[in-house]
């Protein structure tokens, strides 16, 4: 659906600030059609509850833990998924179903 927007953020202060600026600058909250995906989540990331509170007007569709395989998938626009194990496919399908 072209009316939906997906913002992929990394869970650190700079990326969250940039994400908020993108939302405000492009008025993405106007129709409440923005979905947020947290990418590169790890033990040093800002807590998911805090991120949910910061983006409380938007739907957070999931988080992807940091793993190099996920980076490869995202950076190739999901075109290079033939090398994935079942674990990665299962986790990505959950997120993709929330996007669609």
Image (spheres, rainbow, N blue to C red):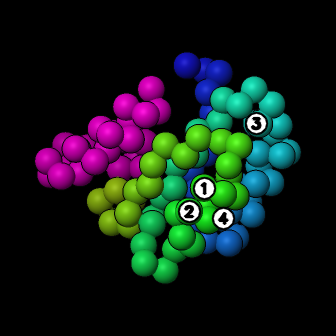
Determine the secondary structure under disc 3.
Answer: loop
Mark 3 is surrounded, within 10 Å at the Cα level, by few (under 14), some (14 to 19) or many (20 or more) other residues, namely some
Residue 64 shown left or right of residue 45 in the figure: left
Q: Which mark is residue 15?
A: 4
Q: Which residue is mark 3?
A: 28
- CA distance for labels 2 and 4: 16 Å
Q: Nearer the viewer, residue 49 or 40?
A: 49
Q: Are marks 2 and 1 in contact (CB under 8 Å)?
A: yes
Magenta segment includes 76: yes
Mark 2 is surrounded, within 10 Å at the Cα level, by few (under 14), some (14 to 19) or many (20 or more) other residues, namely few
Q: Which residue is mark 1?
A: 52
- CA distance for labels 2 and 1: 5 Å
Q: Which residues are magenta?
A: 73-100
- CA distance for labels 3 and 2: 22 Å
Q: Is residue 34 above or below residue 17?
A: above
Q: Which residue is mark 2?
A: 49
Residue 54 pos. (x, y %): 70, 58
Q: Nearer the viewer, mark 3 or mark 1?
A: 1
Q: Quadrant of residue 79?
A: top left
Residue 22 pos. (x, y %): 77, 49
Mark 4 is surrounded, within 10 Å at the Cα level, by few (under 14), some (14 to 19) or many (20 or more) other residues, namely few
């Amino acid at each position: 659906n072209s009316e939906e927007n997906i913002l992929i953020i990394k869970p650190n202060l700079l990326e969250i600030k940039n994400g908020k600026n993108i939302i405000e600058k492009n008025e993405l909250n106007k129709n409440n059609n923005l979905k947020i995906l947290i990418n590169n989540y790890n033990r040093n990331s800002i807590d998911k509850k805090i991120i949910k509170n910061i983006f409380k007007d938007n739907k957070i569709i999931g988080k992807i833990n940091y793993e190099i395989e996920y980076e490869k998938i995202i950076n190739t626009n999901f075109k290079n998924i033939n090398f994935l194990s079942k674990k990665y496919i299962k986790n990505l399908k959950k997120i993709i179903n929330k996007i669609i």
